[in-house]
Image (cartoon, helix red, strand yellow):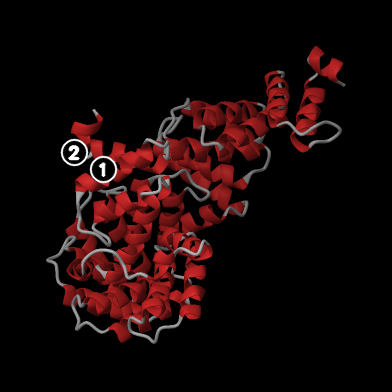
Protein backbone atom coordinates (compact mmCIF):
# COMPACT_ATOMS: atom_id res chain seq x y z
CA UNK A 1 0.00 0.00 0.00
CA UNK A 2 2.79 2.42 0.94
CA UNK A 3 4.49 1.84 -2.41
CA UNK A 4 1.33 2.67 -4.34
CA UNK A 5 0.77 5.71 -2.13
CA UNK A 6 4.31 6.98 -2.63
CA UNK A 7 3.84 6.49 -6.37
CA UNK A 8 0.98 9.01 -6.22
CA UNK A 9 -2.23 7.01 -6.08
CA UNK A 10 -4.61 9.50 -4.42
CA UNK A 11 -7.18 6.90 -3.28
CA UNK A 12 -4.47 4.87 -1.51
CA UNK A 13 -2.98 8.04 -0.01
CA UNK A 14 -6.40 8.94 1.36
CA UNK A 15 -6.83 5.46 2.86
CA UNK A 16 -3.41 5.73 4.51
CA UNK A 17 -4.44 9.08 5.97
CA UNK A 18 -7.46 7.40 7.58
CA UNK A 19 -5.29 4.52 8.84
CA UNK A 20 -2.89 6.85 10.63
CA UNK A 21 -5.74 9.09 11.82
CA UNK A 22 -7.63 6.20 13.45
CA UNK A 23 -4.84 3.75 14.21
CA UNK A 24 -5.99 1.10 11.73
CA UNK A 25 -3.11 -1.36 11.36
CA UNK A 26 -0.53 1.30 12.29
CA UNK A 27 0.30 3.38 15.31
CA UNK A 28 -2.05 6.35 15.48
CA UNK A 29 -0.18 9.43 14.26
CA UNK A 30 -2.00 12.68 13.42
CA UNK A 31 1.08 14.25 11.81
CA UNK A 32 1.54 11.30 9.47
CA UNK A 33 -2.21 11.25 8.78
CA UNK A 34 -2.16 14.89 7.73
CA UNK A 35 0.85 14.26 5.49
CA UNK A 36 -1.02 11.56 3.55
CA UNK A 37 -4.25 13.52 3.41
CA UNK A 38 -2.35 16.46 1.95
CA UNK A 39 -0.67 14.26 -0.65
CA UNK A 40 -4.05 12.83 -1.62
CA UNK A 41 -5.63 16.29 -1.73
CA UNK A 42 -2.85 17.65 -3.93
CA UNK A 43 -3.45 14.71 -6.27
CA UNK A 44 -7.13 15.61 -6.60
CA UNK A 45 -8.87 13.49 -3.94
CA UNK A 46 -12.11 15.32 -3.14
CA UNK A 47 -12.49 13.45 0.14
CA UNK A 48 -9.00 14.48 1.26
CA UNK A 49 -9.57 18.08 0.16
CA UNK A 50 -12.78 18.17 2.15
CA UNK A 51 -11.01 16.67 5.18
CA UNK A 52 -8.33 19.38 5.05
CA UNK A 53 -10.97 22.09 4.67
CA UNK A 54 -12.82 20.83 7.76
CA UNK A 55 -9.56 20.43 9.70
CA UNK A 56 -8.44 23.99 9.02
CA UNK A 57 -11.91 25.37 9.69
CA UNK A 58 -11.86 23.65 13.10
CA UNK A 59 -8.39 25.07 13.76
CA UNK A 60 -9.72 28.54 12.77
CA UNK A 61 -7.31 28.82 9.85
CA UNK A 62 -9.87 30.30 7.51
CA UNK A 63 -7.52 30.96 4.60
CA UNK A 64 -6.45 27.33 4.36
CA UNK A 65 -10.02 26.09 4.94
CA UNK A 66 -11.36 28.26 2.13
CA UNK A 67 -8.53 27.19 -0.16
CA UNK A 68 -9.41 23.51 0.17
CA UNK A 69 -13.18 24.02 0.13
CA UNK A 70 -12.77 25.96 -3.12
CA UNK A 71 -11.05 22.95 -4.66
CA UNK A 72 -13.94 20.72 -3.58
CA UNK A 73 -16.53 23.17 -4.91
CA UNK A 74 -14.62 23.41 -8.18
CA UNK A 75 -15.25 19.70 -8.69
CA UNK A 76 -19.00 20.21 -8.52
CA UNK A 77 -19.83 19.12 -4.97
CA UNK A 78 -22.87 21.18 -4.05
CA UNK A 79 -22.89 20.42 -0.32
CA UNK A 80 -19.62 22.25 0.31
CA UNK A 81 -20.63 25.34 -1.68
CA UNK A 82 -23.02 26.62 0.99
CA UNK A 83 -20.45 25.92 3.69
CA UNK A 84 -17.85 27.82 1.69
CA UNK A 85 -20.18 30.78 1.21
CA UNK A 86 -20.88 30.88 4.97
CA UNK A 87 -17.16 30.81 5.77
CA UNK A 88 -16.38 33.56 3.26
CA UNK A 89 -19.15 35.77 4.64
CA UNK A 90 -18.20 35.09 8.24
CA UNK A 91 -14.50 35.86 7.81
CA UNK A 92 -14.67 38.59 5.18
CA UNK A 93 -11.96 36.85 3.15
CA UNK A 94 -12.28 37.90 -0.48
CA UNK A 95 -12.63 35.39 -3.30
CA UNK A 96 -13.93 35.82 -6.82
CA UNK A 97 -17.71 36.17 -6.45
CA UNK A 98 -18.21 34.95 -10.01
CA UNK A 99 -16.74 31.62 -8.91
CA UNK A 100 -19.39 31.40 -6.19
CA UNK A 101 -22.12 32.03 -8.78
CA UNK A 102 -20.67 29.29 -10.96
CA UNK A 103 -20.53 26.82 -8.06
CA UNK A 104 -24.08 27.69 -7.03
CA UNK A 105 -25.27 26.99 -10.57
CA UNK A 106 -23.65 23.56 -10.34
CA UNK A 107 -25.40 22.99 -7.01
CA UNK A 108 -28.71 24.01 -8.60
CA UNK A 109 -28.14 21.54 -11.42
CA UNK A 110 -27.66 18.88 -8.75
CA UNK A 111 -31.07 19.72 -7.29
CA UNK A 112 -30.09 21.83 -4.25
CA UNK A 113 -33.10 24.05 -3.38
CA UNK A 114 -31.19 26.31 -0.96
CA UNK A 115 -28.60 27.00 -3.66
CA UNK A 116 -31.42 28.45 -5.78
CA UNK A 117 -32.14 31.00 -3.06
CA UNK A 118 -28.44 31.85 -2.66
CA UNK A 119 -28.24 32.33 -6.42
CA UNK A 120 -31.24 34.65 -6.18
CA UNK A 121 -29.37 36.63 -3.52
CA UNK A 122 -26.42 37.01 -5.89
CA UNK A 123 -28.73 38.69 -8.42
CA UNK A 124 -30.53 40.72 -5.73
CA UNK A 125 -27.31 42.25 -4.40
CA UNK A 126 -25.14 42.12 -7.54
CA UNK A 127 -22.60 39.68 -6.12
CA UNK A 128 -20.68 37.98 -8.92
CA UNK A 129 -23.33 38.94 -11.49
CA UNK A 130 -24.99 42.14 -12.64
CA UNK A 131 -27.75 43.17 -10.21
CA UNK A 132 -31.17 42.15 -11.51
CA UNK A 133 -34.10 41.98 -9.09
CA UNK A 134 -36.41 40.33 -11.62
CA UNK A 135 -34.01 37.40 -12.06
CA UNK A 136 -33.51 37.30 -8.29
CA UNK A 137 -37.26 36.88 -7.72
CA UNK A 138 -37.34 34.18 -10.39
CA UNK A 139 -34.76 32.16 -8.44
CA UNK A 140 -36.53 32.82 -5.13
CA UNK A 141 -39.72 31.40 -6.64
CA UNK A 142 -37.90 28.37 -7.96
CA UNK A 143 -36.36 27.80 -4.55
CA UNK A 144 -39.73 28.16 -2.82
CA UNK A 145 -41.31 25.69 -5.26
CA UNK A 146 -38.49 23.24 -4.45
CA UNK A 147 -39.29 23.50 -0.74
CA UNK A 148 -36.59 25.92 0.46
CA UNK A 149 -37.90 27.37 3.74
CA UNK A 150 -36.12 30.70 3.43
CA UNK A 151 -37.47 31.26 -0.08
CA UNK A 152 -41.00 30.52 1.08
CA UNK A 153 -40.47 32.90 3.99
CA UNK A 154 -39.15 35.58 1.65
CA UNK A 155 -42.19 35.42 -0.61
CA UNK A 156 -44.53 35.51 2.39
CA UNK A 157 -42.67 38.53 3.78
CA UNK A 158 -42.77 40.42 0.48
CA UNK A 159 -46.10 39.46 -1.02
CA UNK A 160 -48.17 39.13 2.14
CA UNK A 161 -46.18 41.60 4.30
CA UNK A 162 -46.38 38.99 7.06
CA UNK A 163 -44.60 40.41 10.13
CA UNK A 164 -43.44 37.06 11.47
CA UNK A 165 -42.01 36.11 8.07
CA UNK A 166 -40.27 39.50 7.86
CA UNK A 167 -38.74 38.94 11.29
CA UNK A 168 -37.65 35.38 10.45
CA UNK A 169 -36.11 36.60 7.20
CA UNK A 170 -34.16 39.17 9.22
CA UNK A 171 -32.88 36.37 11.47
CA UNK A 172 -31.79 34.36 8.42
CA UNK A 173 -29.79 37.30 7.06
CA UNK A 174 -28.37 38.19 10.49
CA UNK A 175 -27.15 34.66 11.22
CA UNK A 176 -26.44 33.40 7.72
CA UNK A 177 -29.12 30.70 7.99
CA UNK A 178 -29.79 29.43 4.45
CA UNK A 179 -28.84 32.92 3.25
CA UNK A 180 -25.62 34.85 2.90
CA UNK A 181 -25.01 36.87 6.04
CA UNK A 182 -26.04 40.47 5.43
CA UNK A 183 -26.40 42.75 8.46
CA UNK A 184 -27.97 45.64 6.55
CA UNK A 185 -30.55 43.32 5.00
CA UNK A 186 -31.27 41.84 8.43
CA UNK A 187 -31.89 45.31 9.88
CA UNK A 188 -34.14 46.16 6.91
CA UNK A 189 -36.43 43.19 7.54
CA UNK A 190 -36.40 43.67 11.31
CA UNK A 191 -37.58 47.23 10.72
CA UNK A 192 -40.43 46.15 8.44
CA UNK A 193 -41.68 43.74 11.09
CA UNK A 194 -41.00 46.16 13.95
CA UNK A 195 -43.06 48.89 12.32
CA UNK A 196 -45.95 46.43 12.27
CA UNK A 197 -45.60 46.04 16.03
CA UNK A 198 -43.82 42.65 16.09
CA UNK A 199 -42.13 42.67 19.52
CA UNK A 200 -39.25 40.28 18.74
CA UNK A 201 -38.36 42.36 15.70
CA UNK A 202 -38.50 45.56 17.76
CA UNK A 203 -36.08 44.02 20.25
CA UNK A 204 -33.79 42.78 17.47
CA UNK A 205 -33.82 46.19 15.77
CA UNK A 206 -32.89 47.74 19.11
CA UNK A 207 -29.96 45.33 19.22
CA UNK A 208 -28.88 46.45 15.74
CA UNK A 209 -28.79 50.08 16.91
CA UNK A 210 -26.99 49.14 20.15
CA UNK A 211 -24.18 47.38 18.28
CA UNK A 212 -24.20 49.32 15.01
CA UNK A 213 -25.07 46.13 13.15
CA UNK A 214 -26.38 46.98 9.68
CA UNK A 215 -27.22 50.52 10.83
CA UNK A 216 -25.28 53.38 12.34
CA UNK A 217 -24.86 52.90 16.10
CA UNK A 218 -27.45 54.96 18.00
CA UNK A 219 -28.14 54.13 21.64
CA UNK A 220 -31.10 56.51 21.85
CA UNK A 221 -32.76 54.81 18.88
CA UNK A 222 -31.95 51.43 20.45
CA UNK A 223 -33.80 52.40 23.62
CA UNK A 224 -36.78 53.54 21.57
CA UNK A 225 -37.18 50.08 20.04
CA UNK A 226 -36.40 48.22 23.28
CA UNK A 227 -39.13 50.25 24.97
CA UNK A 228 -41.71 49.43 22.29
CA UNK A 229 -41.03 45.72 22.71
CA UNK A 230 -40.86 45.97 26.51
CA UNK A 231 -44.22 47.72 26.70
CA UNK A 232 -45.70 44.74 24.87
CA UNK A 233 -44.40 42.48 27.63
CA UNK A 234 -41.39 41.02 25.77
CA UNK A 235 -39.14 39.89 28.62
CA UNK A 236 -35.82 40.07 26.76
CA UNK A 237 -36.50 43.71 25.89
CA UNK A 238 -37.65 44.46 29.44
CA UNK A 239 -34.44 43.31 31.09
CA UNK A 240 -32.31 45.01 28.47
CA UNK A 241 -34.24 48.26 28.90
CA UNK A 242 -33.54 47.87 32.62
CA UNK A 243 -29.85 47.52 31.81
CA UNK A 244 -29.96 50.70 29.70
CA UNK A 245 -31.40 52.60 32.68
CA UNK A 246 -28.84 51.06 35.03
CA UNK A 247 -25.93 51.88 32.71
CA UNK A 248 -27.21 55.20 31.36
CA UNK A 249 -27.00 53.91 27.76
CA UNK A 250 -29.24 55.93 25.47
CA UNK A 251 -31.24 57.25 28.41
CA UNK A 252 -30.57 59.14 31.63
CA UNK A 253 -29.33 56.76 34.33
CA UNK A 254 -32.14 55.80 36.69
CA UNK A 255 -31.68 52.81 39.03
CA UNK A 256 -35.32 52.90 40.17
CA UNK A 257 -36.51 52.63 36.58
CA UNK A 258 -33.97 49.85 35.99
CA UNK A 259 -35.45 47.86 38.89
CA UNK A 260 -38.95 48.37 37.50
CA UNK A 261 -38.02 46.76 34.16
CA UNK A 262 -35.86 44.03 35.72
CA UNK A 263 -38.82 43.10 37.92
CA UNK A 264 -41.24 42.89 35.00
CA UNK A 265 -38.92 40.51 33.15
CA UNK A 266 -38.01 38.58 36.30
CA UNK A 267 -41.66 37.92 37.11
CA UNK A 268 -41.97 36.35 33.65
CA UNK A 269 -39.16 33.95 34.55
CA UNK A 270 -36.26 35.61 32.73
CA UNK A 271 -33.16 34.35 34.55
CA UNK A 272 -30.92 37.29 33.59
CA UNK A 273 -33.47 39.74 34.98
CA UNK A 274 -33.83 37.64 38.13
CA UNK A 275 -30.08 37.70 38.66
CA UNK A 276 -29.85 41.44 38.07
CA UNK A 277 -32.79 42.10 40.37
CA UNK A 278 -31.00 40.03 43.01
CA UNK A 279 -27.95 42.26 42.55
CA UNK A 280 -30.10 45.38 43.00
CA UNK A 281 -31.46 44.08 46.31
CA UNK A 282 -27.99 42.96 47.41
CA UNK A 283 -26.39 46.34 46.73
CA UNK A 284 -29.39 48.58 47.42
CA UNK A 285 -29.47 50.03 43.92
CA UNK A 286 -32.88 51.43 42.98
CA UNK A 287 -34.49 49.60 45.87
CA UNK A 288 -33.97 49.29 49.63
CA UNK A 289 -31.19 46.82 50.44
CA UNK A 290 -32.66 43.44 51.36
CA UNK A 291 -30.40 40.37 51.56
CA UNK A 292 -33.30 37.97 51.93
CA UNK A 293 -34.97 39.31 48.80
CA UNK A 294 -31.62 39.18 46.97
CA UNK A 295 -31.26 35.48 47.79
CA UNK A 296 -34.83 34.84 46.63
CA UNK A 297 -34.07 36.19 43.16
CA UNK A 298 -30.62 34.58 42.98
CA UNK A 299 -32.27 31.26 43.76
CA UNK A 300 -34.85 31.63 41.00
CA UNK A 301 -32.14 32.42 38.48
CA UNK A 302 -29.82 29.70 39.80
CA UNK A 303 -32.51 27.06 39.50
CA UNK A 304 -32.75 27.96 35.81
CA UNK A 305 -29.02 27.43 35.41
CA UNK A 306 -27.75 31.04 35.59
CA UNK A 307 -24.10 30.43 36.48
CA UNK A 308 -23.37 33.72 38.29
CA UNK A 309 -26.55 33.33 40.33
CA UNK A 310 -25.44 29.82 41.30
CA UNK A 311 -22.09 31.18 42.51
CA UNK A 312 -23.76 34.02 44.44
CA UNK A 313 -26.18 31.58 46.04
CA UNK A 314 -23.23 29.43 47.10
CA UNK A 315 -21.57 32.48 48.63
CA UNK A 316 -24.82 33.40 50.40
CA UNK A 317 -25.04 29.98 52.08
CA UNK A 318 -21.36 30.01 52.92
CA UNK A 319 -21.43 33.33 54.79
CA UNK A 320 -25.08 33.40 55.84
CA UNK A 321 -25.95 36.41 53.73
CA UNK A 322 -29.74 36.57 53.56
CA UNK A 323 -30.07 32.89 54.47
CA UNK A 324 -28.98 30.58 57.28
CA UNK A 325 -25.39 29.37 56.96
CA UNK A 326 -25.26 25.95 55.36
CA UNK A 327 -21.91 24.63 54.15
CA UNK A 328 -23.37 21.62 52.32
CA UNK A 329 -25.85 23.81 50.46
CA UNK A 330 -23.03 26.24 49.65
CA UNK A 331 -20.95 23.41 48.20
CA UNK A 332 -23.91 22.24 46.13
CA UNK A 333 -24.26 25.60 44.40
CA UNK A 334 -20.50 26.12 44.04
CA UNK A 335 -20.34 22.75 42.27
CA UNK A 336 -23.21 23.66 39.94
CA UNK A 337 -21.45 26.91 39.02
CA UNK A 338 -18.08 25.17 38.64
CA UNK A 339 -19.58 22.55 36.33
CA UNK A 340 -20.65 25.38 34.03
CA UNK A 341 -17.15 26.83 34.00
CA UNK A 342 -17.36 29.54 36.69
CA UNK A 343 -13.67 29.91 37.46
CA UNK A 344 -13.97 31.46 40.93
CA UNK A 345 -16.19 28.54 41.98
CA UNK A 346 -13.66 26.09 40.54
CA UNK A 347 -10.83 27.79 42.46
CA UNK A 348 -12.84 27.66 45.68
CA UNK A 349 -13.58 23.95 45.31
CA UNK A 350 -9.92 23.28 44.54
CA UNK A 351 -8.92 25.10 47.73
CA UNK A 352 -11.41 23.02 49.74
CA UNK A 353 -10.01 19.79 48.29
CA UNK A 354 -6.47 20.86 49.16
CA UNK A 355 -7.45 21.72 52.75
CA UNK A 356 -6.60 25.40 52.34
CA UNK A 357 -7.24 27.09 55.72
CA UNK A 358 -7.88 30.39 53.96
CA UNK A 359 -11.18 28.96 52.73
CA UNK A 360 -12.79 29.85 56.07
CA UNK A 361 -11.62 33.46 56.07
CA UNK A 362 -13.87 36.36 55.19
CA UNK A 363 -13.59 37.98 51.74
CA UNK A 364 -10.56 40.20 51.18
CA UNK A 365 -10.72 43.99 51.05
CA UNK A 366 -12.14 46.49 53.52
CA UNK A 367 -15.80 46.45 54.48
CA UNK A 368 -16.19 49.83 52.81
CA UNK A 369 -14.70 48.54 49.56
CA UNK A 370 -16.97 45.49 49.56
CA UNK A 371 -20.02 47.68 50.02
CA UNK A 372 -18.82 49.91 47.16
CA UNK A 373 -18.09 47.16 44.64
CA UNK A 374 -20.53 44.43 45.69
CA UNK A 375 -19.71 41.65 48.12
CA UNK A 376 -20.42 38.79 45.68
CA UNK A 377 -18.11 40.20 43.03
CA UNK A 378 -15.55 40.81 45.77
CA UNK A 379 -15.69 37.13 46.70
CA UNK A 380 -15.02 36.11 43.10
CA UNK A 381 -12.18 38.64 42.83
CA UNK A 382 -10.70 37.23 46.03
CA UNK A 383 -10.30 33.77 44.49
CA UNK A 384 -8.99 35.15 41.24
CA UNK A 385 -6.36 37.12 43.16
CA UNK A 386 -5.30 34.16 45.26
CA UNK A 387 -4.70 31.99 42.19
CA UNK A 388 -3.30 34.89 40.15
CA UNK A 389 -0.61 35.55 42.74
CA UNK A 390 0.38 31.88 42.42
CA UNK A 391 0.88 32.32 38.67
CA UNK A 392 -2.45 31.00 37.32
CA UNK A 393 -2.75 32.70 33.89
CA UNK A 394 -6.52 32.35 33.57
CA UNK A 395 -7.00 33.79 37.07
CA UNK A 396 -4.68 36.69 36.18
CA UNK A 397 -6.84 37.38 33.13
CA UNK A 398 -10.03 37.18 35.22
CA UNK A 399 -8.59 39.54 37.82
CA UNK A 400 -7.59 41.97 35.07
CA UNK A 401 -11.20 41.88 33.90
CA UNK A 402 -12.39 42.68 37.42
CA UNK A 403 -10.16 45.75 37.54
CA UNK A 404 -11.15 46.85 34.03
CA UNK A 405 -14.90 46.69 34.78
CA UNK A 406 -14.84 47.41 38.52
CA UNK A 407 -16.40 44.05 39.42
CA UNK A 408 -15.43 43.15 42.98
CA UNK A 409 -12.63 45.73 43.17
CA UNK A 410 -12.29 49.47 42.72
CA UNK A 411 -11.99 50.08 38.97
CA UNK A 412 -8.35 50.63 38.08
CA UNK A 413 -7.13 50.50 34.48
CA UNK A 414 -3.48 50.34 35.54
CA UNK A 415 -4.13 47.24 37.63
CA UNK A 416 -6.17 45.73 34.78
CA UNK A 417 -3.26 46.20 32.41
CA UNK A 418 -0.81 44.79 34.95
CA UNK A 419 -2.76 41.54 35.40
CA UNK A 420 -3.56 41.19 31.72
CA UNK A 421 0.15 41.57 31.01
CA UNK A 422 1.08 38.87 33.52
CA UNK A 423 -1.32 36.44 31.84
CA UNK A 424 -0.25 37.53 28.35
CA UNK A 425 3.40 36.96 29.23
CA UNK A 426 2.47 33.33 29.85
CA UNK A 427 0.96 33.11 26.38
CA UNK A 428 -2.68 33.16 27.54
CA UNK A 429 -4.55 34.11 24.35
CA UNK A 430 -7.59 35.94 25.80
CA UNK A 431 -5.30 38.16 27.87
CA UNK A 432 -3.18 38.97 24.83
CA UNK A 433 -6.38 40.00 23.02
CA UNK A 434 -7.36 42.24 25.96
CA UNK A 435 -3.98 43.99 25.88
CA UNK A 436 -4.33 44.58 22.14
CA UNK A 437 -7.91 45.75 22.63
CA UNK A 438 -6.90 48.34 25.20
CA UNK A 439 -4.15 49.58 22.91
CA UNK A 440 -6.55 49.90 19.96
CA UNK A 441 -9.08 51.73 22.12
CA UNK A 442 -6.48 54.37 22.93
CA UNK A 443 -5.56 53.34 26.46
CA UNK A 444 -2.68 55.58 27.46
CA UNK A 445 -1.44 52.97 29.89
CA UNK A 446 -1.56 50.33 27.19
CA UNK A 447 0.27 52.63 24.78
CA UNK A 448 3.02 53.48 27.23
CA UNK A 449 3.64 49.95 28.47
CA UNK A 450 3.31 47.87 25.32
CA UNK A 451 4.40 49.96 22.35
Per the image, the residue denoted by label 2 is 445
The crowd level at tag 1 (other Cα within 10 Å; few <14, some 14-19, many 20+) is many
Q: Is residue 237 left or right of residue 28?
A: left
* The disc label shown at residue 264, or none: none
- How many discs appear? 2
Q: Where is residue 77? Give x, y as percent.
A: 67, 34
Q: Is residue 210 left or right of residue 318?
A: left
- Upstream in sequence: badge 2 or badge 1: 1
Per the image, the residue denoted by label 1 is 417
Relative depth, front residue between 365 and 70: 365
Residue drawn at point x = 42 percent, y = 80 percent: 300
**Can residue 267 be seen by looking at this rendering?**
no
Quarter of the image where the C terminus is located: top left
Q: Is residue 303 left or right of residue 395?
A: right
The reply to whether the C-beta atoms of the residues labelled 2 and 1 are less than 8 Å apart is yes
Q: Is residue 303 above or below residue 337?
A: below
Relative depth, front residue between 37 and 157: 37
Q: CA distance from mark 2 to mark 1?
A: 7 Å
Residue drawn at point x = 24 percent, y = 64 percent: 365
Relative depth, front residue between 263 and 114: 263
The crowd level at tag 2 (other Cα within 10 Å; few <14, some 14-19, many 20+) is some
Residue drawn at point x = 25 percent, y = 65 percent: 225
Q: Where is residue 42? Give x, y as percent.
A: 68, 19
Q: Where is residue 202? Give x, y as percent.
A: 31, 65
Label 2 SS: helix
Q: Is residue 374 left or right of residue 106?
A: left
Amino acid sequence: MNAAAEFGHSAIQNVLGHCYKNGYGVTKDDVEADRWFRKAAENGSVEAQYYLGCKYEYEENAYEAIKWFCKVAEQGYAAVTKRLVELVDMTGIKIDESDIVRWLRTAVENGDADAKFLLGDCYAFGRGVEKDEAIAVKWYRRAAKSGAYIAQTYLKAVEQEDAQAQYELGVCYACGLEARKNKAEAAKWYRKAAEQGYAEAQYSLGGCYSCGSGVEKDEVEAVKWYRRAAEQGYAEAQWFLGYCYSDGSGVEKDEVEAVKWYRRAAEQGNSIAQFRLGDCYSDGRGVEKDKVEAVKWYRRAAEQGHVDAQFNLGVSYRYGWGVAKDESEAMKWYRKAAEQGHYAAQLYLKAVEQGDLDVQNAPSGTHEDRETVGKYDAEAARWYRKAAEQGDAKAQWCLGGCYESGDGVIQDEAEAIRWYRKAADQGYGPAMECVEGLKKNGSQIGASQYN
